């Protein structure tokens, strides 16, 4: 998959989106009932993959746990004033079974959704949760050997970390840095039976979609799993979980794409273990901090590594970009992630400037006014990048040079794309004050010609001589948080 163009993904909270569609169009809130107009509106030109987040069967037992949790209830009420029990669907990551939930239209709805997306030449991405399942998942009763287990003394000593089902004591799901999650049961990554069943489950999921986003994928690596569970998990197999699983799934679905939610600098490890793309959380954190130097350092990593990253400014786990960034900074950051190598993840509501991060348990969200002009900006950006073909070329990070009495270039970043038929230059001022720099351009054939620099976002046109651009560098001056996305073409003789 990585040899193909990296996907531009649009994440949709399926239950929330269906609720909105039902209200707007007066139709049932099921995938098979979504009008064609709503499918047409779902994503702008340039997006090629829709991630329908939260389609699998949610656990009634998990929902009951959520309804009884005062802290969760407070969070629901803060996000959705006037929330009722009917608005609380339960967590999509507390999976009862990998069958499409009746709340989104069941298997029939999922098949209909994929057909609508494929008619629009859009791929479909779905979720898989490898680390845990709901307490009422069929495996709990049928395959206790798939789980990390304890004894009666563990249950008595720490009931928040263990639960009893059918005469067996199971560990509740967790990662090594936080308390156990109360609504899920911990799978054992070292179990060969679990690995085989995971292959079968992912292969079945692959009948409904083109790719899978694997939740908290790093938890299943031998390294992390052994550190988390130690002797309770048994001896680590010689082969890691993901190579064991993904190799076999790809034999059944050779073109299936796998995306890892990844943290703790585990991205390279997961790429080597078979994932096509991994979350680039480090870039997100550095962009949020606004330090151009740290962002630049991140972008000096090897290109093959960067091509396997997913760039994002928000997703269902992170705060809304509009709530964490100044609008001008958010636009500059959006221009950055749209023009870097690797995959891109946009989040439904991001283009409208929504500020409320809706807990994934909810099936409805509050009304929020759309930010003026923001959707038009994103649509223009994504369409321009896609139609330009820049992401088919070769990417290169560029140096930004200042001069002795002007160091403002430290807040600027620049890179180029060069293909057989087109050259592009991206310059971003990642600070809230004006900056100037010279950018020596690396392309052969610049000298002794005039060149047209056309900004794909504003339409502004500049003519420059090639020799100074190559030797001294192109002079660039940008206001705070401003950007250039240039196509560079030879001027007419």
Image: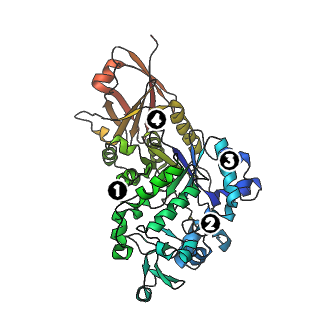
Front: mark 1 or 3: 3
Q: Position of residue 156 (x, y in %)?
A: 43, 89
Q: Which residue is mark 3?
A: 115
Contact (CB < 8 A) between labels 2 and 4?
no
Q: Position of residue 443 (x, y in %)?
A: 35, 24
- For the view shown, which residue lies furthest in the top direction? 493
Mark 1 closeness class: few <14, some 14–19, many ≥20 residues within 10 Å? few
Task: Name the one closer to the observer, 354 or 186.
Answer: 186
> Which badge, 3 or 4, comes first in the chain's sequence?
3
Spatial separation of the CA atoms under disc 2 and disc 1: 31 Å
Q: Residue at x 68, y 64 (%)?
A: 103
- State the SS at label 1: loop
Position of 44 compared to 465: left or right? right
Residue 88 position (above or below residue 434): below
Q: Position of residue 182 (x, y in %)?
A: 50, 76
Q: Which mark is residue 57?
A: 2
Q: Position of residue 421 (x, y in %)?
A: 46, 23
Position of 1 compared to 272: left or right? right
Contact (CB < 8 A) between labels 2 and 3?
no
Q: Which residue is mark 1?
A: 265
- State the SS at label 3: helix
Q: Which residue is mark 4?
A: 391
> Which badge, 4 or 1, comes first in the chain's sequence?
1
Spatial separation of the CA atoms under disc 1 and disc 3: 37 Å
> Which badge, 1 or 3, comes first in the chain's sequence?
3
């Amino acid at each position: 998959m990585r040899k193909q163009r990296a996907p531009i993904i649009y994440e949709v909270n399926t239950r929330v989106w269906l609720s909105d569609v039902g209200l707007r169009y007066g139709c049932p809130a099921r995938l098979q009932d979504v009008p064609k107009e709503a499918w047409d509106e779902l994503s702008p030109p340039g997006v090629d993959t829709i991630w329908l987040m939260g389609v699998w069967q949610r656990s009634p037992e998990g929902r009951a746990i959520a309804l009884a949790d005062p802290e969760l209830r407070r969070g629901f009420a803060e996000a959705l004033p006037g929330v009722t029990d009917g608005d609380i669907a339960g967590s999509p990551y507390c999976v009862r079974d990998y069958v499409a939930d009746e709340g989104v239209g069941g298997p029939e709805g999922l098949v209909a959704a994929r057909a609508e997306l494929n008619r629009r030449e859009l791929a479909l991405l779905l979720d898989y949760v490898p680390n845990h399942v709901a307490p009422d998942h069929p495996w709990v009763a049928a395959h206790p050997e798939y789980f990390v287990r304890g004894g009666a003394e563990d249950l008595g000593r720490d009931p928040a970390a263990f639960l009893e089902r059918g005469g067996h004591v199971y560990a509740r799901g967790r990662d090594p840095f936080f308390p156990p999650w109360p609504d899920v049961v911990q799978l054992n990554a070292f179990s060969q039976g679990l690995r085989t069943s995971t292959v079968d489950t992912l292969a079945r999921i692959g009948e409904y979609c083109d790719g899978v986003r694997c939740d908290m994928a790093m938890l299943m690596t031998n390294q992390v799993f052994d550190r988390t569970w130690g002797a309770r998990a048994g001896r680590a197999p010689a082969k890691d979980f993901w190579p064991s699983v993904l190799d076999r799934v790809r034999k059944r679905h050779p073109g299936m794409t796998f995306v890892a939610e990844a943290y703790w600098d585990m991205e390279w490890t997961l790429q080597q273990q078979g994932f096509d793309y991994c979350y680039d959380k480090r870039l997100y954190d550095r962009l949020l901090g606004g330090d151009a130097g740290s962002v630049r350092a991140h972008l000096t990593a090897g290109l093959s590594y960067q091509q396997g990253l997913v760039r994002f400014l928000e997703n269902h786990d992170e705060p809304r970009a509009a709530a964490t960034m100044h609008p001008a900074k958010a636009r500059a950051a959006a221009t950055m992630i749209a023009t870097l190598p690797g995959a891109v993840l946009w989040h439904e509501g991001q283009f409208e400037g929504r500020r409320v991060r809706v807990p994934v348990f909810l099936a409805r969200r509050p009304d929020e006014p759309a930010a003026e002009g923001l959707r038009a900006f994103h649509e223009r950006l994504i369409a321009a990048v896609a139609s330009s073909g820049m992401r088919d070329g070769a990417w290169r990070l560029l140096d930004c040079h200042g001069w002795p009495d002007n160091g403002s270039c430290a807040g600027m970043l620049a890179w180029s794309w060069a293909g057989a038929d087109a050259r592009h230059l991206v310059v971003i001022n990642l600070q809230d004050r004006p900056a100037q720099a010279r950018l020596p351009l690396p392309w052969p054939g610049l000298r002794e010609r005039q060149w047209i620099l056309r900004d794909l976002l504003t339409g502004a046109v500049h003519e420059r001589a090639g020799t100074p651009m190559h030797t001294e560098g192109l002079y660039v001056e940008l206001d705070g948080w401003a950007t250039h996305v240039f196509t560079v073409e030879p001027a007419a003789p």
